[in-house]
Image (cartoon, rainbow, N blue to C red):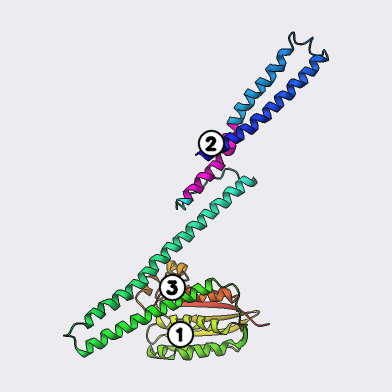
Amino acid sequence: MKRLRSLNLAFVVIVFLIMISSGALSGTFIYILYKCNIVNELVPRPMILIFVIPVTSIIIGTIISLITSRRVLKPLNELINATKEIAKGNFLVQVVNNHNCGELGDLISSFNDMVRQLNGVEMLHRDFINNFSHEFKTPIISIRGFAKQLKNSTLTNEEREEYADIIIRESERLTNMSTNILILDKLENQVIVSNKTKFSLDEQLRNCILLLEKQWESKNLDLQIDLSEVTIFNNEEMLEQVWLNLIGNAIKYSPENSKLTIECYKNGSEIKIKIIDSGIGMTDEVMAHIFDKFYQGDLAHKSEGNGLGLSIAKRILDLCDGKISVKSKLNKGSTFTVWLVAEE
C-alpha cells in the first residue's frame, strides 16, 4: 500500500509542478500586459490578477490531478495487487481489462495470459507430484508387504516362490519407472537431436515387432503388417523406443485372438505410420490427457505401466520433427498415427 501511495503522490507532484509553471507563466504574461498599459482599461486593479490567476490555476490543477491520477493509475494499482497475489501462490487472479487498445491494454492482456499459463503449470506440477508419489508408493508397499510374509515360517514353497516373484516384478517396475523418469528428464532438457543416420524405417519396425514376439504370441494376436520400403534420416535409437512403446501398448491393451494392424507408407514429403489395435479403447477425456506424464486413465490402471511411455514417445517425436495423434472409441480399439519427414 505504501508503494501505491508513493506512486499516486509522485503523479500528483508532477502535475502540481506543471500547474505551478503554467500559473507562473500566466502571471508573467499578465504582468507584461500590465506594464504595457493594455489591461488598465479592462481591470481597475490588474495587480490582483498576477496572484489570483496562478493560485486559481494551482488549486484547480491539483484537484484535477488528484481525480485523474486515481483513474489513470487504477489499472496499474490492480496489476500491482494481482502481482502480490501471485507471489502468495494465487494463480487464479485476473485483472479486468477495460483498455481494448494501447500499451496498457496489451500489458494487462499479457499479464492475464501469463497468469493462466502459470496456473496451468502449477496444476501440472501438482498432478505430477501426486501421480509420482502414488506410482512409487504402490510397488514399495507391495514389496514391503510380501517381504514380511516371507518371514512366515508356515508358508509353503509354492507360496514363497509366488511372493518372491511378486517382489521381483515390483522391483523391476520401480527400476523401469526410475529409468523412464531419467529418460524423460533428459529429453525435456534436450533441444537438438544428434547422431542422425540414414536407415530403413520399415526394417526397423519389423525388428521391433520381432522383439515383442513373445508378447503378441502369448495373446495369439492376428498381426496385419503392411510396411512399404521407406528410408529416413533421423535418430535411429530414439525412434526405436517410440515403436517399442506404441506397439507394446497396442499389444498390452488388445484382447486375446484380436487383430493388430501396423502400417508404414510414404505420402508425399511425409512418412505415415499407423498402429491400430482392437483393444479397450479410450474416452474423449482420456485421449485429451493421454500424453501427459503419469496419466493412465481409469482402465489403464488395471494393467501394468507407469504412464510415462507415451510422454517419452511424444517428446522424442517432437525432437525428431515428427507428430503423433490418437483416435479411439471405448471398447472399439485405438489408432495411433505418427508423421515423420521423409528423406529428400
Residue 99's disc number? none
Is residue 136 rendered to the left or right of residue 152? right
Q: Please name the amino acid that badge 3 sits on.
A: Lys
Is 228 left or right of 221, judged from the image as shown?
right
Amino acid carrying mark 1 in the image = Leu
Within 10 Å of disc 1 (Cα), the crowding (few <14, some 14-19, many 20+) is: many
Q: Which residues are magenta?
A: 67-86
| Secondary element at image label 1 | strand
Q: Are marks 3 and 2 in contact (CB under 8 Å)?
A: no
Number of the label disc, if any, that sits on residue 329: 3
Residue depicted at x 50% and y 57%: 118
In reply to whether residue 125 is colored magenta, the answer given is: no
Is the C terminus in the top left, top right, bottom left or bottom right quadrant?
Answer: bottom right
Residue 253 visible (yes or no): no
Would you name the residue on which mark 2 appears? Answer: 5
3D distance between C-alphas at marks 1 and 3: 16 Å
Which residue of the protein is positioned furthest toward the right in this rendering?
Answer: 36
Residue 324's spot in the image, x, y percent? 54, 74
Residue 166 screen position, x and y as percent: 30, 83
* Residue, disc 1: 260
Pick whichever of labels 1 and 3 is earlier in the sequence.
1
Q: 10 Å neighbourhood of mark 2: few (<14), some, or many (≥20)?
A: few
